[in-house]
Image (spheres, rainbow, N blue to C red):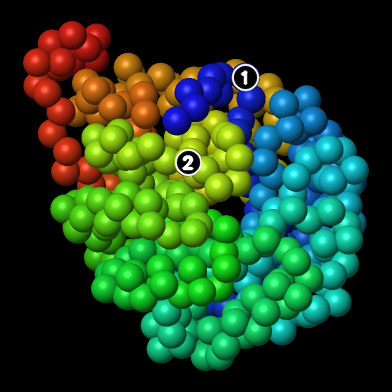
Amino acid sequence: MPSLDFSLNPFIVIWETTRACQLACRHCRASAMRHRNPNELDLKEVTHFIIDQLTEMDYPLFVLTGGDPMERDDLVEIVRQARYAGLRPSITPSATPKVTYAIMRDLKDAGLENWAFSLDGSHAEIHDRFRGIRGTFALTMEKIDYLHQLGIPLQINTTVSQYNVDDLPALAELVGKLGAFRWSVFFLVPTGRARVEDLLAPQQQESVLEWLVSLEQNVPFDIKTTEAPQYYRLRSQNGSAHASRAGAQTRSEVSVWDGNGFLFVSHTGEVYPSGFLPVSIGNVRTTPLSRLYRESPVLQALRDPNRFKGKCGYCEFNKLCAGSRARAWTITGDYLESDPFCPYIPDPRRKREMPNSV
């Protein structure tokens, strides 16, 4: 696995285009609403404060999320501006009637690189319940067919919780049948509308990650995790030599975590280590994004595993894994604390060697 220095430039930047969305997902990080915020970044601001800045930060992956990006009427132009600047824009919209064949074609022509749809169940009963709107599963299948017709690469996103953990094997089979190049598996963080009681128990999460490590050797798609960096520890422990099908240094290969290679910009320009760790480090309207990323004391702390507390501070895998900083923050109130949902017990002899041990 590539070991990259993310002190100067992020590997991936997520921009929350809007918080408007017509779905009512029970796990929604953004607590999305029906209408757009009038204080959202406009096209000129996005171009100046985000896109132009990213060209000075070694052209990281650029993902447009929400809410639902389809709620913006300038979406095609945003993608065109990003591509013109040399970025590789991807998008993660909701499967709603606004996703038409025509808009998908226009986005591809504007330079869109990848498209991600969410599937949180292998059939309508689970997925529609999760998304809060009946018929969403059928719409997703219809829109995925459009992607295939247009030749746009497909990524499937799944948020794992108590609602669908038993359905994951069937979901994995469906991901393969749909021809996705990547399965992006999110592990729930209790922020926004998500609840603590919906989280997997620590050993339950570990078992799912072990299964994913085994699964990736036998499926035609890449697997990546979000807010479960223990996946990279388990890969290392199991000696899994992961050969990317999409080329070197893809998102599936590189271990990034909140604030370390990963950056999130909100719909109003607030900047966070990630969407699941809403600790603001400033706003792009007042401070250049490159300066915020490189100089923020919060991000500098997150990028230094020696400053982590508890067992994450002396774990031999902390430079590869780091634990979920967002889950540490939501559960303990301290983003440098040990990940409370990691069951791994590191060698206690290492604790005496760490400067933060007491």
Q: Position of residue 178 (x, y in %)?
A: 55, 73
Q: Secondary structure at mark 1?
A: loop
Quadrant hosting residue 159: bottom left
Q: Is residue 191 above or below residue 176?
A: above
Residue appearing at x 72%, y 26% in the figure = 57
Q: Is residue 87 above or below residue 105?
A: above
2 or 1: tag closer to the N-terminus: 1
Report crowding for label 2: few under 14, some 14 to 19, many 20 or more residues within 10 A (C-alpha): some
- Taking the view exactly as shown, the residue that stands out farthest to the left is 349
Q: Is residue 201 above or below residue 245?
A: below
Q: Position of residue 322 (x, y in %)?
A: 34, 31
Residue appearing at x 18%, y 9% in the figure = 353
Q: Nearer the viewer, residue 201 or 84?
A: 84
Q: Which residue is mark 2?
A: 243
Report crowding for label 1: few under 14, some 14 to 19, many 20 or more residues within 10 A (C-alpha): some
Q: Which residue is mark 1?
A: 8
Q: Secondary structure at mark 2?
A: loop
Residue appearing at x 76%, y 75% in the figure = 149
Residue appearing at x 49%, y 35% in the figure = 254
For badge 2, the amino acid type reads Ala
For badge 1, the amino acid type reads Leu
Q: Is residue 238 left or right of residue 261?
A: left
Q: Position of residue 134 (x, y in %)?
A: 52, 90
Q: Nearer the viewer, residue 246 or 95?
A: 246
Quadrant hosting residue 116: bottom right
Marks 2/1: CA distance?
27 Å
Q: Is residue 77 left or right of residue 124?
A: right
